[in-house]
Amino acid sequence: MSHFQSWRVAIFGRAALVFLCVGYVAEAAPGFSCSQYALMAQSASQSKRDTQSRQQKLANPLNDLLDEAQRDIDANNFEAALAPLQKFIAEKPEVPFAHFQLGYAYTALKRGDEARAEYERTIALDPKMPEAYLNLGILLLDKQEYVAAVTPLSKAVDLLPAQSRPRSLLAVAQERSGDQEAAARSFEGVLHLDPNDLTANQYLGELDLRRNKPAEAEARFRHALEIRPDAPEALQGLAKSLDAQNKPEAVDAYRKYLAVMPGDAGARARLIHLLVNAQDYDAALAELDRADDGKPPSLDSLRLRADIQIGQKKFADAIVTLQQAIALAPRDAQLVGGLGRVYLQKRDFASAEKELKAALQIDRNNVMYWKDLSSTYYLSGNYPATLATLDVIAKMEPPNSGAWFIRALCYDKLRQFKPALEAYEKFLAMEQGKMSDQIWQAQQRSKVLKHMLEEKR
């Protein structure tokens, strides 16, 4: 999944809510930001009113301590806020607001264990303060204690049923805990409250992709892009969903994603593959040149370049590229076998034989290399070697009609007329009811061979 950005922590201040940006990165659902989360709890809660009422009844010296702490917090001088809050709590340990503010200061100072203890004390004193559950849940998310974060965030959702952000945070905790079904339900709840929630649309789109529902994913990602047209996760998700449906628009979607995230090598490689499959070789090569610009080509890049050059029928260039790749991976049978096949295309049979035999030394059970080798022998006129290679292939898979036709031609060339006739007849039996030049040739040659064999009797 994509990365989270920073999250706002909703903090319950003395006269108003104040917010602290806590950096949190997790590979889960995309789209959280400080500015989004700052809207989390701006409406006054019952807990806030109760706390303010209690504060008004406190003696002035204690209120002065809270005022001092608040000024320090407003000035982001969180270390200085600790002493007055601790003094207040020493006198009035039953006031949840003071514990909450102290937890807030500890959070800002990245003293997570102490912050957690203060939020838990706040909840024990005031079980209906949603901000305490929220901050505790976010703190646990920040510590990557995802399972533990589910409980306080679930409570925050219960206390703030009309707000979407607690559900988003809960969904994150559930997803990172491995409960994808619960996360999906939570994000569906988010969309019920706010259909334009970017994170929920993107997460559910990713979930649809994982569930092999690319059409549904496409709709989710298109809606996400209506909300934020340059959202990288939505652009990537749309490209993937179109790709999964084999839609030609996937090419343009990948290009738009790469315009925003040009460093995504995997997405660029996928775009190049799509261009190659569409036989748009010039565009594929341009993308590959862009990816390789200013750096030595990687093994994967050389593979792609060779594929493109082969598609363009630039076999000489492909040979050079494959030789470069083999220098990086000399035991890669696919590269060596591929080089043999390119030599075969160029009708350089000696070089093709050499490379294909080398590939079989690495991967002796690869039937494709044996088939290419048999073609090499046949086209070079080495009929005994062709037959021997066909015998090896026949042990690996049943001969098809094409194999019988080549076998018949080899026997015929070697003037072994009886096995040639048998091979022609097996070919014709497998191709019964079809029409082709090979069938006509086999029929005519069979007649001649039968006549020749009958004359020898």
Image (spheres, rainbow, N blue to C red):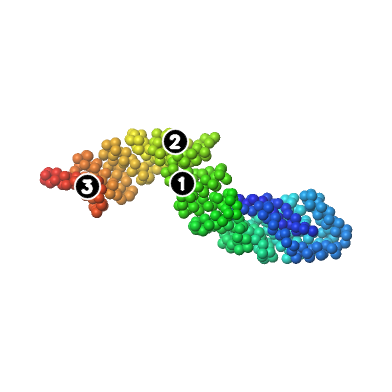
Front residue of this view, candidates 22 and 250: 250
Residue 22 place in picture, x, y as percent: 69, 52
Q: Amino acid at mark 1?
A: Leu
Q: Amino acid at mark 2?
A: Thr
Task: Tell which circle, 2 or 3, labels the residue nearer the N-terminal end.
Answer: 2
Q: Which residue is mark 3?
A: 440
Residue at left offset 54%, top offset 55%: 222
Q: CA distance from mark 2 to mark 3?
A: 42 Å
- Crowd class of label 3 (few under 14; some 14 to 19; many from 20; radius 10 Å): few
Residue at left offset 40%, top offset 39%: 312
Residue at left offset 58%, top offset 57%: 201
Please tell me whether mark 1 sits on a helix, a strand or a loop.
helix
Q: CA distance from mark 2 to mark 1?
A: 20 Å
Task: Tell which circle, 3 or 1, labels the residue nearer the N-terminal end.
Answer: 1
Res 321 label? 2
- Crowd class of label 1 (few under 14; some 14 to 19; many from 20; radius 10 Å): some
Q: Is residue 123 visible?
A: no
Res 274 label? 1
Q: Is residue 280 visible?
A: yes
